[in-house]
Image: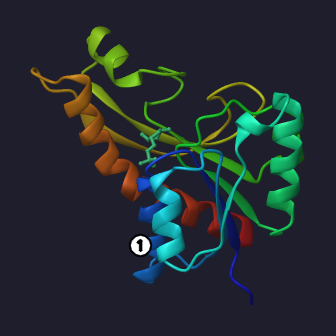
């Protein structure tokens, strides 16, 4: 049987995308990557993917007139690869409801917080400010509401006394890199039952 196909969307360094590539190479994640797509032409993750021999595409949101026209072009581009799963990995764009509906139940995201806590940005500083003893990351199915939708898997880390947003972010990121491949594997196993 053919392996499930992923399209991964990034905006920056792409360390979560790299963790997925490494899990595939290590033989622990039975999927293929059809393409890595970035909305930023200078995303470091695109260089990595090119060097790894993965098909890449850049769709610069700045060259589109509206959020709607960008999302339509992005959906068309993704569709051209016929993926089973669309993986948001540090993709820093809010997506239109139409886009989300188009990929209903096949669009997932990683968010650096224990959802439903701390949706949105600056999650690490907000967790520290709120006096949280525990923080982490969540992989969830994307629905029309930002950072909402059913959680697939979460990873937890302690918040330490002297943590800054940076030290906490680094501790969470280390877990994200294990969490995302594990969550993708879980989703694929659940849907093939
Ligand atoms: C990660 O912390 C992710 O949870 C958040 O943005 C960051 C992206 O990092 N949404 P990277 O580009 O995968 O390295």
Residue 193 seen by the camera:
no
Placement of the C terminus among the 4 image quadrants: bottom right
Image mark count = 1
Visible residue check, residue 190: yes
Residue depicted at x 70% and y 72%: 5
Q: Is mark 1 within 8 Å of ligand 1?
A: no
Query: For the N terminus, which image quadrant?
Result: bottom right
Q: Would you place residue 75 above or below residue 192 in this image? A: above
Q: Is residue 86 above or below residue 97?
A: below
Residue 76 relative to residue 13: left or right: right
Left or right placement of residue 108 versus residue 153 in this view: right
Report x, y in % for residue 24.
49, 77
Q: Quadrant of residue 81?
A: bottom right
- Residue 60 in the image, given as x and y percentages of width and height: 70, 44
**Quadrant of the image occupied by residue 116:** top right
**Pointer 1 residue:** 22
């Amino acid at each position: 049987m053919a392996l499930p196909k992923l399209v991964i969307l990034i905006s920056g360094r792409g360390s979560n995308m790299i963790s997925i590539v490494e899990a595939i190479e290590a033989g622990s994640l039975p999927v293929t990557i059809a393409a890595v797509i970035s909305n930023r032409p200078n995303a470091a993750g695109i260089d990595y993917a090119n060097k790894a021999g993965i098909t890449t595409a850049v769709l610069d949101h700045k060259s589109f007139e509206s959020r709607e026209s960008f999302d339509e072009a992005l959906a068309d581009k993704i569709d051209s690869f016929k993926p089973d799963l669309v993986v948001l990995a540090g993709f820093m764009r809010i997506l239109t409801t139409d886009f989300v509906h188009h990929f209903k139940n096949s669009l997932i995201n990683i968010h650096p917080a224990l959802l439903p806590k701390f949706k949105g940005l600056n999650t690490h500083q907000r967790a520290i400010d709120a006096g949280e003893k525990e923080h982490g990351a969540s992989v969830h199915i994307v629905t029309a509401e930002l950072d909402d939708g059913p959680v697939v898997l979460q990873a937890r880390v302690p918040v330490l006394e002297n943590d800054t947003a940076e030290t906490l972010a680094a501790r969470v990121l280390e877990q994200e890199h294990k969490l995302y491949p594990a969550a993708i594997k879980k989703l694929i196993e659940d849907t093939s039952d």
